[in-house]
Image: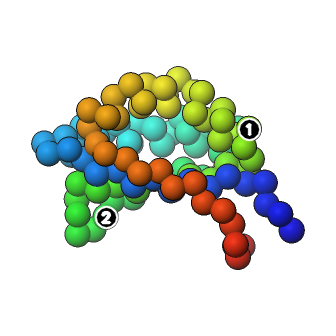
Amino acid sequence: MTSTQVKVVAILTAKTGKERELEQLLRSMTGPSRAEPGNIHYNLWRVRERPDEFVIDELYVDAEGAAAHRASPHYQRYLGVINDLATRNPLPLEPLDTI
């Protein structure tokens, strides 16, 4: 069975001195992102041994849900400031064996 879900994991590393600002920005994204109709989950993690590194774990019902997220005002605000706060590495994933 082919899944239409869209999974993205993003790894963000705060620029020096920007750890608190980055965390605040990322925390501000969780509520609005979870409230989106196409969102299944949106989770924020911090790497234990590297407190300047964060992981966002996102899952959307389909490509339209993911596109709606990227078009949302909170995501557009995020895009406007993220490059000043962090380097980011988004990883769109393809399901191979999931439940």
Task: Establish if 68 lies above or below 58.
Answer: above
Residue 50 image point, x, y percent? 23, 63
- The quadrant in which the C terminus is found is bottom right
Image quadrant where residue 65 sits: top right
Quick one: 49 or 28, which is closer to the camera? 49
- Which amino acid type corresponds to the residue marked 1 in the rendered image? Glu
Image quadrant where residue 33 sits: top right
Please report whichever mark, 1 or 2, sits nearer to the chain's N-terminal start. 2
95 with respect to 16 (left or right): right
50 with respect to 97 (left or right): left
Name the residue carrying label 1.
64
Image quadrant where residue 20 sits: top left
Q: Which mark is residue 56?
A: none
Task: Establish if 8 lies above or below 72.
Answer: below
Residue shown at 48% from the left, 26% from the top: 76
Residue 11 image point, x, y percent? 39, 55
Quick one: 43 or 8, which is closer to the camera? 8
Tell me the element at label 2: strand
3 with respect to 45 (left or right): right
Residue shown at 14% from the left, 45% from the top: 16
Kindly report the distance in space between the C-alpha atoms of the residues bearing marks 1 and 2.
30 Å
Residue 54 image point, x, y percent? 34, 55
Q: Residue furthest left?
A: 17
Task: Establish if 53 lies above or below 34.
Answer: below
Q: Which mark is residue 47?
A: 2
Tell me the element at label 1: helix
